[in-house]
Image (spheres, rainbow, N blue to C red):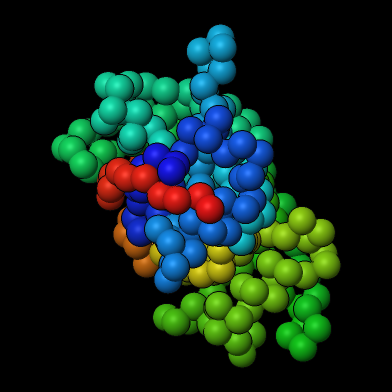
Amino acid sequence: MIPFVKAHACGNDFLVIEEPLAQRRHAELARKLCARNTSVGADGIEFLERRANGDLFLRLFNADGSEAELSGNGTRCVATWLARSEGRMDVVFGTDGGLRTCRVVEAADPLYLIESEMGIPRVMPRTIELPGVGNVAGAMVNVGNPHFVVFVETEDFSAHGHGWQELGAKISASPLFPHGTNVEFVRVLSPSKIAFRIFERGCGPTRSSGTGTCASSAAAMALRGVDRELTAVAEGGAQRTLWPSSDGVMRLTGPAEIICVGEVSAL
């Protein structure tokens, strides 16, 4: 049996499992345990490694078994669990996308509001060509993992005659992105507010994404002239971003909640 914690951040749900329990079966466990109808169900698993020097390191595996650099929401879920179980109000995680610092702003167990330092976003305007679609203008954004942001005007977030889910799948799997990419469709609602939808690499459509929130906000700030502090609304709820300058660290503030703690068979 494998002990686990399940948590979500704005509907983006993760399992948290201690690294030694993985026994080098990370991808297999992710595919098995994240299955919605036959197991616990989640968008991914955060494997928490506690190193001998006291450092913490996270490895993220998506529901399809692929490994990703990091997840903003997943990192926040782990921080929430450590705050609840160990009283750690400030924590630094190593990830394959760089160091991420999380600080508890409010605690009302099982719900926690956490501010995360998300690194310095890099935004590059880019037009890509997709078979059967044509040219799609957007921006490549790196926030420790890759994103492609498309600005839309439609209320249903459709673009180029395609629903956002269909177009997101095409962009994410394009040969232009050999390792895949996350895709966001962004509507600017006002100078201080955006709405967006997410097609997540390795998961498909998701209700929220921490790095997706940052990528969408960074693209809107850099290319649409919106405020440097934004409310970003996804299907799962709103998060706040603050990016004082293009060479500064972006901060992300949002909730995370513990759903349950349990054990599951790994057979």
Position of 73 with respect to 23 (left or right) is: left
The structure residue drawn at horizontal position 64% and vertical position 85%, both measured from the top left corner, is 160
Q: Within the image, what quadrant is residue 256 found in?
A: top left
The structure residue drawn at horizontal position 66% and vertical position 39%, both measured from the top left corner, is 24
Asked whether 91 or 41 is in front, the reply is: 41
Q: Residue 103: x, y in percent? A: 36, 27
The structure residue drawn at horizontal position 40% and vertical position 54%, both measured from the top left corner, is 13
Q: Within the image, what quadrant is residue 252 found in?
A: top left
Position of 38 with respect to 7 (left or right) is: right
Q: Residue 162: x, y in percent? A: 60, 87
Q: Quadrant of the N terminus?
A: top left
Q: In the displayed orientation, state which residue is furthest to the top.
A: 53
Asked whether 112 or 86 is in front, the reply is: 86
Q: Residue 154: x, y in percent? A: 48, 81
Q: In the displayed orientation, state which residue is furthest to the left.
A: 108
Asked whether 50 or 203 is in front, the reply is: 50
Rendered position, 247 above or below 180: above
Q: Within the image, what quadrant is residue 102 found in?
A: top left
Rendered position, 37 above or below 116: below
The structure residue drawn at horizontal position 72% and vertical position 52%, both measured from the top left corner, is 124
- Disc tally is 0
- Report if residue 12 is visible in the image: no
Q: Residue 93: x, y in percent? A: 52, 27
- Report if residue 167 is visible in the image: yes
Rendered position, 50 above or below 203: above
